[in-house]
Amino acid sequence: MAGRGSFSNKLGFILAAAGSAVGLGNIWSFPFEVGAGGGAAFLVMYLIFCFILCFPVMVTEIAIGRKTQLNPAGAYAALGFKKWKILGILGILSGVVILSFYNVVAGWAFGYFVELLSGNFDIGNQFGSFIKDVFKVGGYAILFMLATAFIVSKGVAGGIEKASKILMPTLIIMILGLVIYSLTLDNAFKGLSFYLVPDFSKLSLGVMGNAMGQAFFSLSLGMGALITYGSYVGKDDNIVSSAAFITLADVGIAFIAGLMMFPMVAYLTDGTMEGAGQGAGLIFTVLPGAFQSLGPTLGVVIGSLFFLLLSFAALTSTVSLLEVPVAYIVDEKGVRRSRAVWIMAGIIFALGLPSLLSNGYSAFFSSFITYVGSENATSFMDFAQNVANDTFLPLGGCMISIFAAYAWKTKNLNEEIAKGYPGYMGSFVQKYLNFAITILCPLVLGTMFLLTFLQTFFGVNLF
């Protein structure tokens, strides 16, 4: 296998996998999903999905990767189940589609860093025209893809791990500093109340489906990223503790992002929280005004710092998303790593062009499809997110659970997990993971996938 590598130690794996999980999903989409979901009620469901459903799937993905030392598609075949290879390919395709539009949003974030660094606080009011400027945003997206490809081309230990050891601690320090600042703002506690005090009357199937999709998206599950990263893990590493650290890091940073975001929204809306659920543009439209109120100097420093943070978070995830198809080409086609990286980077950027054009520049891509039962057209970018993020990822998690429990068998899964975890056999952890993988995950994820799919694409609400 050409150019395969490994993480130098357990810390390197945890930071890289946590970097994969921690990204725009935590700092960009998590706050607007919470806002759209009514606040704390969404947060509660998100936490339940992360710890009860996503954690067992994460352990399973890492175990499959470590057992086979292969990419998602090759892993199923190596275990003796060639027909299941399609599940690995589905995961790889999901990651490719997600990276194609994710790179566009990363371009927005880096563009805002540049704009605020130059003192353009009015960029929040210009969001619609900014994302419509395909040449400017496209240029930023190209820079982002080049940075991503450069890191991945350097290999696992020398590129992905090394970058994660720098980016992750820096990201955490930056976000904690911004949380401290936001909590000093007027009406901060009204924002915290919206975020932390649940109103369960706001729960609906749609909110629960979005919470599940957000959990899988932010934890990089169902797309083969953790099977791929697991394939670089040492045989003596404790998979369960590693998965626990990754989940806690991801959930912790998402939670802290909310502590940063909603006091700022409350400050700008005099505590009314109007606009908290306005969607994907929440961070890009709301925050520049908050930074402007700090004055020209401090506002530039804090504002540009925030969007640099967002760019750092995006980079930790784009690296893992690109690594998945690269590992597939290296393993299955014998292509040299550096060549595989630049081929896939070019293909994925090209696939992202419709998403780039779908924010007002092209009428065709901006009103790409109208779902059954919907009055409004959906843009290509939102369609890609609905298909890959909201549909394929939960489906992938459900099918991975079914594979591990009923094809590969829990006996083999347990044997792989027990390596590096001497007290695993017979423990409560083993009993819970086996229950979750055989019954809970297939049942809940399968049901939620079906209900969300019917509601999203066909307007059928069974509850």
Image (cartoon, rainbow, N blue to C red):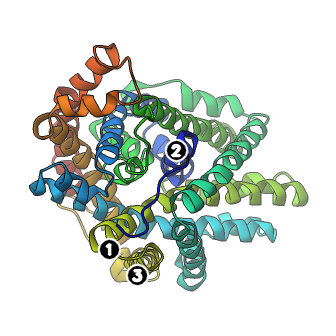
Mark 3 vs mark 2: which is more N-terminal? 2
What's the mark number on residue 18?
2
Q: Quadrant of residue 374?
A: bottom left
Q: In the image shown, does 287 or 406 lie closer to the viewer?
A: 406
Q: In the image shown, does 129 or 344 lie closer to the viewer?
A: 344
Q: CA distance from mark 3 to mark 1?
A: 23 Å
Mark 2 vs mark 1: which is more N-terminal? 2
Number of residues whose C-alpha sits closer than 10 Å to that of mark 3, classed few (under 14), some (14–19) or many (20 or more): few
What's the mark number on residue 334?
1
Q: In the image shown, does 73 or 147 lie closer to the viewer?
A: 73
Q: Quadrant of residue 82?
A: bottom left
443, above or below 387, in the image: above
Tell me the quadrant of the picture where the C terminus can be found.
top left
Number of residues whose C-alpha sits closer than 10 Å to that of mark 2, classed few (under 14), some (14–19) or many (20 or more): many
- Label 3's element? helix
Counting from the top left corner in percent of width and height, residue 27 is at: 57, 49
On screen, residue 173 versus residue 345, left or right, reads right
Eye-nearest disc, 3 or 2: 2
- Residue of label 3: 350
On screen, residue 418 versus residue 14, left or right, reads left
Q: CA distance from mark 2 to mark 1?
A: 28 Å
Looking at the rendered structure, the kind of residue marked 3 is Ala
Looking at the rendered structure, the kind of residue marked 1 is Gly
Residue that protrudes farthest toward the bottom in the picture: 135
202, above or below 338, in the image: above
Confirm or deny contact between disc 3 and disc 2 (CB under 8 A): no
Eye-nearest disc, 2 or 1: 1
Q: CA distance from mark 3 to mark 2?
A: 28 Å
Counting from the top left corner in percent of width and height, residue 198 is at: 47, 25
Eye-nearest disc, 3 or 1: 1
